[in-house]
């Protein structure tokens, strides 16, 4: 199925519903939930997936596993998706929190095939076998830590979301404290209590996470300079330590 609404087929008696959707660049799917678990794969572009307490960056050829009932928002940057909407009782092993995963070549090909299935595809034939194999392949995927946590209170989370959208190396603890009319010491203590790390450490992590969509249209050198790194090499080293792969491996549009 391509470019159909989940609500139109959600009650079809199939444990796995594959849907492919093409999105306008910059299109935002505002806060919503799905009754089913979702395997959201981006065949192109970058997706920014937000939940109440975390933000995930999903580059081309990665996917995010979204638990059933999870409130989330997705920003699509030149994205064509291949999604699987899955009955929760078919995947009792599904993670309780979102997780970004690498996608194997086999799984990628299965997804490309599956999105051409009709809603009521034949469970006893080839299509049913592909759907079953998709679930087997997902269980083998490796998570990639392309996310950053958010503080629990709306005002601190708002500061963090704004920073992820426009990371500014000049921002300091004093800058943020002033915006909330707090002393720097009180602000830092409160932030650490809610986020589990200091504001400065959070911003360092957030700049690396926020670099993923930037790398879609800019070179490693340009992104390193924008984010305040002394050289492309130092940015590459920090990025690779955090995520397990080099920024130069991400596709550019």
Image (tube, grey):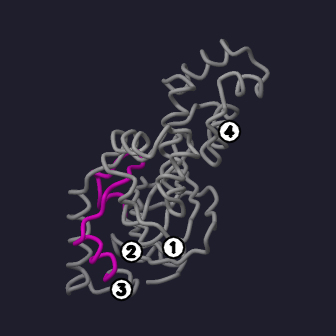
Nearer to me, 156 or 117: 156
Label 2 with label 4: CB-CB less than 8 Å:
no
Tell me, for residue 117, which label it has, or none: 3
> Is tag 2's residue or tag 3's residue first in the polypeptide sequence?
2
What's drawn in magenta, residue-wise? 87-113
Query: In the picture shown, does residue 149 fall above or below 59?
Result: above
Q: Is residue 36 left or right of residue 25?
A: left
Give the secondary structure at mark 3: loop
Q: Is residue 183 left or right of residue 190?
A: right
Give the secondary structure at mark 4: helix
Residue labelled with disc 2: 17
> Residue at coordinates 49% horizontally, 37% vertically from top-left?
230
The mark closer to the camera, 4 or 1, is 4
Label 2 with label 1: CB-CB less than 8 Å:
yes
Residue labelled with disc 1: 6
> Is tag 2's residue or tag 1's residue first in the polypeptide sequence?
1
> Is tag 4's residue or tag 1's residue first in the polypeptide sequence?
1
What percent of the width, then of the height, locates residue 207?
Answer: 53, 41
> Residue at coordinates 29% horizontally, 61% vertically from top-left?
90
**Label 1 crowd bin: few (<14), some (14–19), many (20+), radius 10 Å:** some
> Residue at coordinates 30% horizontally, 72% vertically from top-left?
108
What percent of the width, then of the height, locates residue 95?
Answer: 34, 48
């Amino acid at each position: 199925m391509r470019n159909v609404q989940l609500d139109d087929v959600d009650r079809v008696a199939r444990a796995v519903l594959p849907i492919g959707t093409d999105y306008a660049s910059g299109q935002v799917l505002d806060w919503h939930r799905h009754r089913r678990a979702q395997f959201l794969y981006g065949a192109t572009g970058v997706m920014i997936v937000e939940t109440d307490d975390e933000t995930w960056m999903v580059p081309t050829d990665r996917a995010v596993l979204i638990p059933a009932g999870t409130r989330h928002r997705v920003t699509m940057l030149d994205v064509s998706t291949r999604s699987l909407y899955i009955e929760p009782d078919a995947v009792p092993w599904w993670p309780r929190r979102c997780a970004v995963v690498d996608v194997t070549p086999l799984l990628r090909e299965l997804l490309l095939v599956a999105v051409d299935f009709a809603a009521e595809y034949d469970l006893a034939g080839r299509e049913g076998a592909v759907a079953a194999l998709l679930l087997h392949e997902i269980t083998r995927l490796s998570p990639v830590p392309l996310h950053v946590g958010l503080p629990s209170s709306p005002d601190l989370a708002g500061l963090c979301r704004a920073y992820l959208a426009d990371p500014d190396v000049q921002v300091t603890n004093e800058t943020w404290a002033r915006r909330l009319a707090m002393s720097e010491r009180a602000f830092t203590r409160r932030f650490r209590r809610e986020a589990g790390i200091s504001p400065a450490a959070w911003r360092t992590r957030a700049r690396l996470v926020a670099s993923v969509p930037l790398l879609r249209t800019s070179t490693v050198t340009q992104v390193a300079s924008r984010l305040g790194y002394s050289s492309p090499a130092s940015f590459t080293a920090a990025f690779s330590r955090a995520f397990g792969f080099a920024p130069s491996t991400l596709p550019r549009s």
